[in-house]
């Protein structure tokens, strides 16, 4: 898939209301890309869980899938802004994290030249497209930061890595004292969902930061996640901050092991036991957009924790 020409799944001019027909059209247009990403991540999960020769065979399988698209310059054709670029950066996150994850605790080797060139070109596109977007530094910029950080780790590019972490720092500056993000509160009924969606790339970037010895204060992220966890238990907390809008989850869904997969990264990076009940309730946690199975990649044994449920999960 070379081109990504798509439109938003929201009603035109209103980013608080989902349009089912537009969502369906978008799904159809991105189906080949999503099928590919799901396959790569599935085989990466299999490699991570295997040992010995079986692991090496599965790693080689993932590399063949990556090379096939790399040699055809996939995702580097006509890409609509901003929606096509959104998909491209999410894809770069999934591919990069899948590559890193399939080596388990081993130090990942430098990827084969076609894969390295491809990931570098995708990362350079992300950095170019998302640099200077001071007018709208919302969750999309955070995901661009994770795309840069994860791809730069695969290809060993320090400037791209530094650009990615800069997006984390800017996000932390945007977190208010109550844990809210102003641009995500503007989502109205989807404010709680989009706060969780923002915490996803930020929590993953914190894993990279911690692994590289960066011990800067993570208090803003703790405030953000604290608000999310309180909001899951009592959505009215976020509703009050979002102008009274009754909170719903994306496309009528519920908080689950996919949309809350980032909690594994947050718990590992911060040690915050406040997340334990939710993690215990939702495991296994994993989603293609974060490279797959995070419970086996990052999850820790947890002390006995009371499982939690959210009113958002009620029928």
Image (cartoon, rainbow, N blue to C red):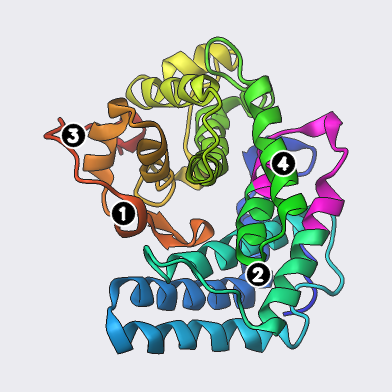
Between residue 30 and residue 93, name the one nearer to us. 93
| CA distance for labels 3 and 4 | 33 Å
First in sequence: mark 2 vs mark 3: 2
- Depth check, mark 2 against mark 1: the one in front is 1
- Depth check, mark 3 against mark 4: the one in front is 4
| CA distance for labels 1 and 3 | 16 Å
User: Looking at the figure, which quarter contains the C terminus?
Assistant: top left
| CA distance for labels 2 and 3 | 36 Å
Q: Are dots 1 and 3 in contact, CB under 8 Å?
A: no
| CA distance for labels 4 and 2 | 21 Å
Which residue is the site of mark 1? 295
Which residue is the site of mark 4? 141
Can you tell which quarter of the image residue 102 is in?
bottom left
Q: Main secondary structure of the magenta part?
A: helix
- Element assignment for label 3: loop
| CA distance for labels 2 and 1 | 27 Å
First in sequence: mark 4 vs mark 2: 2
Position of 203 with respect to 283 (left or right) is: right
Q: Are dots 3 and 4 in contact, CB under 8 Å?
A: no
Position of 292 with respect to 77 (left or right) is: left
- Depth check, mark 4 against mark 2: the one in front is 4
Which residue is the site of mark 2? 30
First in sequence: mark 1 vs mark 3: 1
Q: Are dots 2 and 3 in contact, CB under 8 Å?
A: no
- Element assignment for label 2: helix
In the image as oriented, which residue stretches furthest toward the front?
213
- Element assignment for label 1: helix
- Element assignment for label 4: helix
| CA distance for labels 4 and 1 | 25 Å
Q: Are dots 4 and 2 in contact, CB under 8 Å?
A: no
What segment carries the magenta color? 125-145
Which residue is the site of mark 3? 307
């Amino acid at each position: 898939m070379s081109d990504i020409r798509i439109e938003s799944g929201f009603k035109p001019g209103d980013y608080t209301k989902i349009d089912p027909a537009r969502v369906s059209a978008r799904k159809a247009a991105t189906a080949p890309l999503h099928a590919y990403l799901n396959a790569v991540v599935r085989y990466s999960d299999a490699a991570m869980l295997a040992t010995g020769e079986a692991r090496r065979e599965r790693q080689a399988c993932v590399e063949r899938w990556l090379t096939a698209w790399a040699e055809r310059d996939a995702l580097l054709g006509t890409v609509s802004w901003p929606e096509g670029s959104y998909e491209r950066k999410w894809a770069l996150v999934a591919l990069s994290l899948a590559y890193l994850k399939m080596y388990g605790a081993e130090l990942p080797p430098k990827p084969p030249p076609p894969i390295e060139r491809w990931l570098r070109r995708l990362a350079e596109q992300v950095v170019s497209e998302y640099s200077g977007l001071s007018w709208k530094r919302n969750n999309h910029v955070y995901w661009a930061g994770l795309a840069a950080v994860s791809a730069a780790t695969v290809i060993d590019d320090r400037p791209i890595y530094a650009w990615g972490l800069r997006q984390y720092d800017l996000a932390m500056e945007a977190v208010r004292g109550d844990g809210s993000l102003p641009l995500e509160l503007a989502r109205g009924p989807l404010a709680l969902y989009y706060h969780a969606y923002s915490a996803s790339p930020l929590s993953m970037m914190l894993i990279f930061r911690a692994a590289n010895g960066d011990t800067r204060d993570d208090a803003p992220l703790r405030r953000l996640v604290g608000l999310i966890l309180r909001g899951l238990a009592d959505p009215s907390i976020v509703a009050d901050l979002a102008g009274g809008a009754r909170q719903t989850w994306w496309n009528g869904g519920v908080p689950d092991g996919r949309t809350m997969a980032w909690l594994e990264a947050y718990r590992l990076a911060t040690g915050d036991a406040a997340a334990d009940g939710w993690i215990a309730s939702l495991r296994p946690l994993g989603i293609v957009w974060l490279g797959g199975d995070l419970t086996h990649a990052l999850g820790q044994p947890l002390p006995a924790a009371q499982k939690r449920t959210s009113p958002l999960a009620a029928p």
